[in-house]
């Protein structure tokens, strides 16, 4: 790959083209031969694996276990919960047959009309229905509760306009599905998982998020309340990054799941569900990266450090190899992941550009002069700065730098969000300011009509009613009716 | 659950009913509402996660990376490789539509006839075709090779007769797909992964396996050679536990994937694929378990030790809790996973039966007398024996015992296999002995005709041509024609 192949469309020219270029050129993902379905390439998948491992640990620490439920959902199950089917029926992949046969009229194979399913199967767009049909057999008494299951799975929603990671027909995710004896316990669970997502987003992805509740229009199909974390991308658009739903007794009623309490009285079970998906990859990419390529938080980078030797002959390389081996050992002993690229078919300049594009947080380069002086060049990806430092205690230097990078990119994203969050009181001002992108905090009268009017006229949606926001009441910017608190608006992915 | 609910049908009465009982009662898996698809319950999934983690580490140690390819395969892709489509067309789940709509004639939803796909999509039964269509764009030159990808995924094969874990319409697996510049390198890779599988089976699952090559009849659809590991279950039936395929240039030719070698000459790329699935759960269960329940190898047990307190009053429990806390710390410090069950709504006898059923390798029980004497009762699941030991150095005692259990159950399974592997020279004797179950080593003339005749007349198949077997030539037991070495026969799952 020549250097120019690594060049990205600048963000200022076209943000969406920059994103597309970056996903492809950094080897994160690509479109497949199947409409709307992506191939997640090894480098992209390695980041996703880091996310998975961390989230999975956090789920287990909060008492959850993993399980696996079927890919297919009988069509009749979807219809059981009225809002749920309304929300998902329009974008379902439907399995109707279970066999192919040789084409009687020519080459290849055709669907065998003899092998039609009695009831069509839906490729799961989400698993509430099949899981609550299963829970029915697991729950008799309050002693069987709570059930705290999660599954890592693929789901399919037949989206018409797709973009790598952000919106794909098939995506990978985790979906937690919990069952509880009381409303309070289920609500607490839904909020607990929102906190887990927020902690993961901020501490691992270095991505600040606003926690809040969705308005009725933006709620999950079948939920009583949807909690969300909302992040602001560099182009001023919001990205919903994770949701946690309090489902009330809706699915328990749809699948007739009841339990006997301590006094033997039967009641319907209370539920939550919560999920994050490979969409987080898009959020991660757009939160920190620049015109030179990816910028990855050290906690999620497939390798945190790359070492590049700079040499004129085999003898120099042998000497650098020896030093590098020591450095690698010292770094690994501190739990730092490192790649040593001494491949001889690429020049250092090519390698520098490559690892910049791939967002490796720290680059170490060692040449003949470094060997003489017992030094090494250390470059950080987030600020694109470099300096020459002494080799002694290099593992401490790198560890401190990695911490600093993690904090710095979070702070940078937080500063961006602060600079792009404004408070607006009149609808006129709102319509003007929304064109600049960013979050807008404004008063709203709480009705769907007003929300829909704002969306139709400005393309902005209510991202959430913030949980920890300013609770000063006011008047709706559109209708002047009373509003208990400002809500968060933005145009969104 | 009352004690009788934990009782299993004895193996001597009905081995298949015993298996079914065990899978259900030990909370490993259950049938779902979707024909042939299972729900993997949390305890079963925890074992699968242990397997996954270990295999994934072994794949990475041998240079492989993970990626993710689409769930769907365009129908036309399947037809590209003639043997491949022949092998999979008869058991495919076919997606024909992408939308549901309200039922115009009544309740619920129906498939929207307006939303018919131009080309049907097959839910992947295996991913060679979609992956080789992708590799076409990844490979230009020998510098792009080898590609060493693996994916963890779900696949669907519309089996008519299903059994939990052993044969299900949907199952979980990993599939490695590698691309190489030379035939030798691809063959070496296929054999390397066979070794990885054999090591995993023997060292982690404690399940001895025979490594070998499949006969042409039993080969993967589209492979040049299929390598296999074959295990012997307690009922004398063989279970194919993992396969690694040398695919030659078949898929490269089907998808026109070529590369330029160092001299600029173009050739088709050489391929392998290899996989193990949740079927391994069935193999694990049937290798070691007994009429009391599961027997798990310590290396794959979700928790290796359970501690059960035996007390008459709250005061005693408080004292045991305190001791148990110290024991748990000491065990965890040695990397031993442990569960402390001090729940007060179950009696010790119930707990003993429960953990026996679930195959926890070591059970520690502590009562009032143990407190006085600074002792603890230690019971091993594999031999169902117990003794009282001193508490000092309990972590060493347990660690040694876990090692011993791991070795003992492997040795027990190996002894069983030795006792049930015989050498036979005449077809008459073969027909008689095959009724007893077990492996039979016999000479075969190498033809499909003879193999098919044996299968039709005895239900036995050639499990493999052993790689490290006795290489003494002989005469086919059926036709008397020359045979270069004995091959391994058995009735199989």
Image: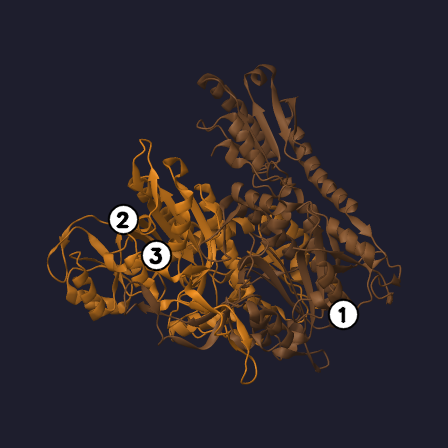
Chain colours: A orange, B brown
Q: Please report, as a chain letter, where disc 3 is located.
A: A
Location of residue A215 in the rendering, given as x and y in whole percent from the top left corner: 24, 56
Whether discs 2 and 3 lie on one chain: the answer is yes
Whether discs 2 and 1 lie on one chain: the answer is no
* Secondary element type, mark 2: loop
Residue B132: quarter of image? bottom right
**Residue tagged 1:** B449
Find the distance from the CA under tag 1 to the CA under tag 3: 75 Å
Q: Earlier in the sequence, mark 2 or mark 3?
A: 3
Is residue A207 left or right of B168 when viewed as pictured?
left
Residue B395: quarter of image? top right
Is residue B315 left or right of B276 when viewed as pictured?
left
Count the marks: 3
Q: Please report, as a chain letter, where disc 1 is located.
A: B
* Secondary element type, mark 1: helix
Find the distance from the CA under tag 2 to the CA under tag 3: 20 Å
Do the numbered discs 2 and 1 sit on residues whose CB atoms are within 8 Å? no
**Residue tagged 2:** A467
Location of residue A123 in the rendering, given as x and y in whole percent from the top left corner: 43, 63
**Residue tagged 3:** A415
Q: Is residue A440 visible?
A: no
Q: Residue at x 75, y 69 (%)?
A: B448
């Amino acid at each position: 790959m020549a250097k120019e192949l690594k060049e990205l469309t600048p963000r200022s020219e076209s943000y969406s083209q920059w994103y597309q270029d970056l996903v492809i050129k950094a080897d994160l993902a690509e479109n497949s031969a199947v409409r709307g379905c992506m191939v997640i390439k090894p480098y992209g998948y390695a980041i996703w694996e880091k996310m998975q491992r961390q989230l999975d640990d956090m789920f287990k620490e909060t008492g959850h276990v993993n399980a696996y439920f079927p890919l297919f959902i009988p069509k009749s199950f979807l219809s059981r919960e009225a809002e749920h089917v309304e929300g998902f029926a329009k974008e379902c992949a439907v399995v109707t047959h279970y066999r192919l046969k040789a084409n009687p009229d020519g080459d290849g194979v055709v669907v065998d009309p003899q092998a039609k399913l009695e009831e069509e199967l839906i490729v799961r767009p989400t698993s509430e229905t099949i899981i609550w049909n299963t829970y029915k057999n697991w729950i008799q008494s309050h002693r069987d509760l709570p059930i705290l299951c999660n599954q890592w799975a693929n789901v399919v929603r037949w989206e018409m306009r797709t973009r790598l990671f952000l919106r794909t027909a098939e995506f990978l995710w985790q979906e937690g599905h919990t069952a509880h004896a009381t409303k309070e316990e289920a609500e607490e669970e839904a909020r607990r998982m929102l906190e887990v997502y927020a902690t993961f987003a901020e501490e691992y992805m270095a991505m600040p998020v606003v926690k809040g509740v969705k308005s009725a229009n933006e709620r999950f199909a079948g939920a009583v309340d949807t909690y969300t974390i909302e992040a602001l991308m560099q182009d001023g658009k919001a990205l919903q990054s994770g949701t946690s739903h309090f489902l009330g007794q809706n699915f328990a009623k749809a699948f007739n799941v009841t339990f006997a309490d301590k006094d033997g009285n039967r009641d319907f079970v209370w539920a939550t569900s919560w999920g994050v998906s490979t969409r987080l990859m898009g959020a991660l990419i757009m939160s920190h990266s620049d015109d030179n390529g990816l910028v990855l938080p050290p906690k999620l980078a497939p390798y945190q450090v790359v070492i590049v030797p700079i040499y004129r002959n085999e003898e120099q390389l042998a000497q650098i190899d020896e030093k590098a081996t020591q450095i690698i050992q010292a770094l690994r002993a501190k739990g730092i992941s490192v790649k040593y690229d001494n491949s001889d078919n690429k020049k250092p300049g090519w390698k520098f550009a490559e690892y910049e594009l791939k967002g490796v947080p720290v680059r170490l380069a060692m040449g003949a002069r470094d060997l003489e002086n017992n030094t090494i060049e250390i470059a950080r990806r987030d600020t694109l700065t470099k300096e020459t430092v002494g080799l002694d205690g290099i593992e401490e230097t790198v560890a401190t730098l990695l911490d600093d990078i993690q904090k710095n990119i979070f702070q940078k994203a937080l500063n961006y969000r602060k600079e792009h969050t404004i408070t607006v009181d009149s609808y006129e001002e709102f319509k003007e300011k929304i064109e600049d992108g960013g979050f807008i905090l404004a008063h709203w009268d709480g009705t769907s009509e007003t929300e829909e009017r704002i969306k139709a006229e400005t393309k902005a949606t209510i991202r959430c009613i913030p949980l920890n926001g300013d609770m000063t009441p006011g008047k709706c910017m559109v209708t002047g009716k009373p509003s208990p608190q400002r809500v968060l608006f933005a145009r969104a992915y």
